[in-house]
Image (cartoon, grey):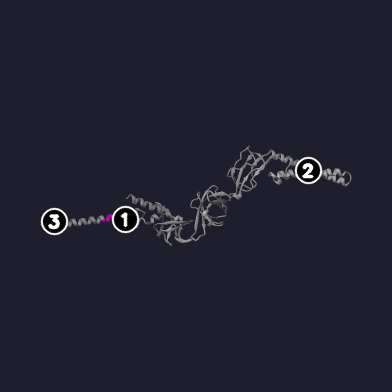
Amino acid sequence: MKKSLWLFLLIISLLFGGACQENSSQTLEVAEEGATLGNPYHEEAGPTQISLLPEALKGQTFQNELVRRQTVLSEIKVTAAIEPNQYKLAQISPRIEGKAIQVIPELGDLVQAGQTLALLDSIELGQKKAEFLQARVNLKLARRNFKREHRLFKQRISSEKEFLDAQGEFERNRAAYRASREALRMIGVPEEEIKEMQWDAKNHPLSYFHLTAPFAGTILARNITMGEMIRPTDVPFTLADLTTVWLALDIFEKDLAHISEGLKIRFMVDAYPNEWVEGTLTHILNVLDPDTRTVHAHAEIENRSGRFRPGMFATVVIRVPSSDQRESIVIPQTAIQKVANKSLAFVEERPGTYAVREVILGTPVPPDIEIREGLKEGERVVTKGSFYLKSILLAETIGADSD
């Protein structure tokens, strides 16, 4: 009887234990399934792969680029600075001393060719104009007298002496007129203004003159104030046509054998990072700086938009022909993300699944970059959306570290 009871209790305990174990397994499966649904992404193969569920893809835009092979030229990288085009730069000075009674443009203003920059009052100019007007009147009178004496001499009414005296007076006044006219021209008085000059010019005293812009451009310097005496040795205005600028760079002596005018360059200014601009090396000086062992060169850059401003620093890459040309794997620079001092790229295996690849970078060939190791030709890397994948990778790494 006791033996039968013991067997019954043993069977009941085995059945109950199995049911508990089955329920425990079912609970674990549900928990795991719930964890998967609650997390929009999960790693399928450790940190080398990221898989996104459909709900994690909503609102995200991904673009891919093909890993391709192309020729990578040897390049020389130098620093440079933006300068005004020296062939379109003017330091504007008066040719005669005068007092500034009106100053018009401000620093940085755009001005047109012939526009007045300042109105000056010059005692010396007033005297020279007065001398010219007097010489013009004297010449007119001397000419009239000479013509009269010439007519009377032909009619034998006046003597030869009177005729010769009138002729001499006419020649002296003509020389004085020409000298006074040339004196005005030499100090910058326009020919048209000389022709129209009068004693009684309204609202324009003889001592006033305009300092004007020789061409259209931008005021880079304004060293003049109201009431200041300006001399020919002063430079009250500096004007530059900034529709083109110079990219000034220094080339080291060791690189000169590979550099020549006409080579293609790329440059990027600090103000616009990751934005490379194409150009051409236009001039290389023939003199080597003995202190820096460099040769100065420049490239002329179109700048009608005004984005490149004198004083900006730039990084310049010069493509040089050499025997070091090679076929290499390249991808867009936007496909590279930095994580823990490593360069990573995300390779699309299928929509929503991306392999995480550590890559070794080579020569930049903007907008692309050479890949020495880590990718194969024909694979597709994520460009737009790579930062989103980087944030997911960082979140998973932090979560793993906290566990």
Residue 140 highlighted magenta (yes or no): no
Q: Which quarter of the rendering shows the N terminus?
A: bottom left
Q: Earlier in the sequence, mark 2 or mark 3?
A: 3
Dot 2: element: helix
Mark 2 surroundings within 10 Å by alpha-carbon count, few (fewer than 14), some (14 through 19), many (20 or more): many
The kind of residue tagged 2 is Asn
Mark 3 surroundings within 10 Å by alpha-carbon count, few (fewer than 14), some (14 through 19), many (20 or more): few
**Residue under circle 3?**
6
The picture places residue 402, in percent across and down from the top left corner, at 33, 49
The kind of residue tagged 3 is Trp
**Residue under circle 1?**
33
Q: CA distance from mark 2 to mark 1?
A: 114 Å
Dot 1: element: helix
Principal SS element in the magenta part?
helix
Q: Magenta residues?
A: 25-35
Discs 2, 1 touching: Cβ within 8 Å: no
Mark 1 surroundings within 10 Å by alpha-carbon count, few (fewer than 14), some (14 through 19), many (20 or more): few
Q: CA distance from mark 2 to mark 3?
A: 153 Å
Dot 3: element: helix
Instruction: Give the side of residue 300 with respect to residue 353, left or right.
Output: right
Q: CA distance from mark 3 to mark 1?
A: 41 Å
Do we see residue 383 in this rendering?
no
Count of numbered marks: 3
Residue placed furthest toward the right = 156
Instruction: Give the side of residue 335 with respect to residue 105, left or right.
Output: left
Do we see residue 13 in this rendering?
yes
Instruction: Give the side of residue 23 with respect to residue 376, left or right.
Output: left
Mark closer to the observer (2, 1): 2
Residue placed furthest toward the left = 1
The picture places residue 117, in percent across and down from the top left corner, at 63, 43
Q: Earlier in the sequence, mark 3 or mark 1?
A: 3
**Residue under circle 2?**
173
